[in-house]
Image: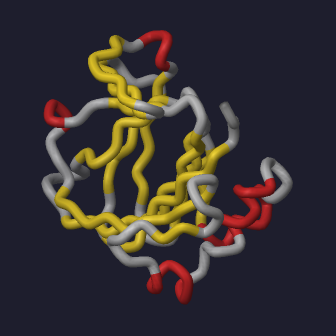
Amino acid sequence: MILAKNEQAACYRGIHPRLDEVLDRLNDAFLESVGTETQKIEGDKLYVTRFGYETLPEEETFFEAHKRYLDVHVMVEGEERVEIASPEGLTLFEHKDDFYAYRGEAEHSCILRPGMFLVVFPDDAHRIKMQVNGPKKVAKVVFKLLVYEE
């Protein structure tokens, strides 16, 4: 997991070539251009989508994880609490393709605010959409990048 401000993105270059592509796009002009339809940057290997929703009480949320993809969540407006846990300590209740849904207890917690990004690696189970001091409308850009080929 990496939690940082957008202006610190260059500090994380070199981890993976597709992550470098994402980090280069953490600027207002690109983020504002992303719509709610998935935008393919490198086919199914790197794509981006804008999401809008209202944050939820913790009991209405769950953890998700992926085995092949790394996610980069970039907060545009609003704020949400995010929790991270190792899938090994959680209970799997749904699985489809590269989406694994879990219930259980968090190991780490953070608040994602505008101008910040969160990188969750494969097997970083992450619970998103959680309220901070009540419900808030959120706009977030999420990049998905393939890091493990089948």
**Is residue 143 shown above or below 24?**
above
Residue at the extreme right of the image, as rendered? 14
**Is residue 54 shown above or below 147?**
below
**Is residue 58 shown above or below 23?**
above
Where, quadrant-wise, is the N terminus in this rendering?
Answer: top right
Classify residue 38 by image quadrant: bottom left
Where, quadrant-wise, is the C terminus in this rendering?
Answer: top right
Look at 51% across and 20% down and name the residue there. 86
Look at 80% across and 56% down and name the residue there. 17
At which x and y percent is residue 56? 16, 47
39 vs 35, left or right, is right
Look at 20% across and 53% down and name the residue there. 55
66 vs 99, left or right, is right
Look at 59% across and 65% down and name the residue there. 5
At which x and y percent is residue 78? 30, 67
79 vs 120, left or right, is left
Q: Nearer the viewer, residue 68 or 54?
A: 68
**Tag count:** 0
**Is residue 19 shown above or below 101?**
below
Classify residue 89 by image quadrant: top left
Instruction: Name the image colouring.
Output: secondary structure
At which x and y percent is residue 106? 39, 24
At which x and y percent is residue 37? 36, 71
